[in-house]
Amino acid sequence: MTALPSPMTESGDLALRIAGLEWGVGGLTIVKDIDLTVNAGEFLSVIGPNGAGKTSLINLISGVYLPRSGSIAMFNNDVTNMRPADRTRRGLGRTFQTSSLFPGLTVGENVRLAAQAALGGSLRLFTAPRRDDQATARAEDALERVDLANRRKDVVSALSHGDKRKLEMAVVLAAEPKVLLLDEPTAGVSVEETQPLVGLIRDVHQSGTTIVMVEHRMEFIVDISDRIAVMHEGKILTVGTPAEVMADEEVRNAYLGGHR
């Protein structure tokens, strides 16, 4: 199967346009000549064997890495060489495989700090915000969305792994992202906690947020994705609907039925 173009490309309503993207370490090339578009409001999942370059691609889109060559545009604005904070201000949010929370702070404090940073305000935590403070209001709204409002005074270290994942989502949602990058959101989450987390991700997408997700649970990916991009050895092997990707023999050999 050859890579399929995004079905809405002609409209020009693209959340992301990635062209000729390449990155590596030393003499090793890890991401090779990536061309990919993501529509506004689309849910695109990225799959592939371990070492395929999936997280490296997310790091490039979010600005953690800068490419050797190629370009990244978000809503027709070139962000290729922008710092992560500048991309956040333009509407890009991102979660990580490992927790980026402050474990010694409360649930509410973590989200309020994120809201303050997104609003360009002070990062001082103890500034006695008013009840109608914009950062506090954003934080409360984000906690409500992830069903953690009743845990706002709990210290993060007391949360289950699944609730920490939900809190990470709240931290990102407090910045009101237009594009959300999720890197293995269900990693380490118990079976019991996976479904509420999946439901949350689905709700965020249905609210209009564009999502690009790296994930390994195929039953989750097939159910929630509009399209799936398959990476192999640093390249995009194919892009298609879940049904097209699942039926593709080359994909099965490289990933679904082969090594991981």
Image: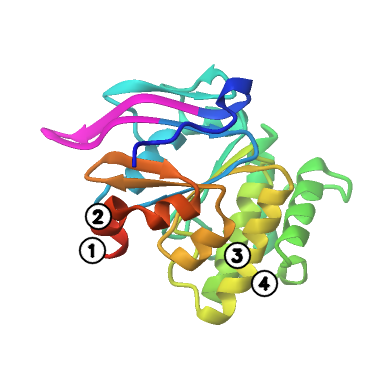
Q: Which residue is mark 3?
A: 198
Image quadrant in which the C terminus is located? bottom left
Q: Earlier in the sequence, mark 3 or mark 4?
A: 4
Closest to the camera, between mark 2 and mark 4, is: 2
Q: Earlier in the sequence, mark 2 or mark 4?
A: 4
Q: Residue furthest bottom?
A: 192
Residue 132 percent coordinates (x, y):
89, 46
Q: Nearer the viewer, residue 58 or 199?
A: 199
Residue 165 percent coordinates (x, y):
55, 64
Q: Secondary structure at mark 1?
A: loop
Q: Nearer the viewer, residue 183 or 88?
A: 183
Q: Which residue is located at x 24 percent, y 55 percent?
A: 254
Note whether 236 is above or below 128 in the view shown: above
The local crowd at label 2, few if under 14, some if 14 to 19, many if 20 or more residues have their Cα within 10 Å, is some
Residue 49 visible: no
Q: Where, by quadrant of the figure, is residue 258 drawn?
A: bottom left
Q: Which residues are magenta?
A: 17-35
Q: Which residue is located at x 48 percent, y 22 percent?
A: 79
Q: Amino acid at mark 3?
A: Val
Q: Amino acid at mark 4?
A: Asp
Residue 163 visible: yes
Residue 79 in magenta? no
Q: Are marks 1 and 2 in contact (CB under 8 Å)?
A: yes
Q: Amino acid at mark 1?
A: Gly
Measure the alpha-carbon separation of dots 3 and 2.
Answer: 26 Å
Q: Which residue is located at x 34 percent, y 34 percent?
A: 65
Measure the alpha-carbon separation of dots 1 and 2.
Answer: 6 Å
Q: Which residue is mark 4?
A: 154
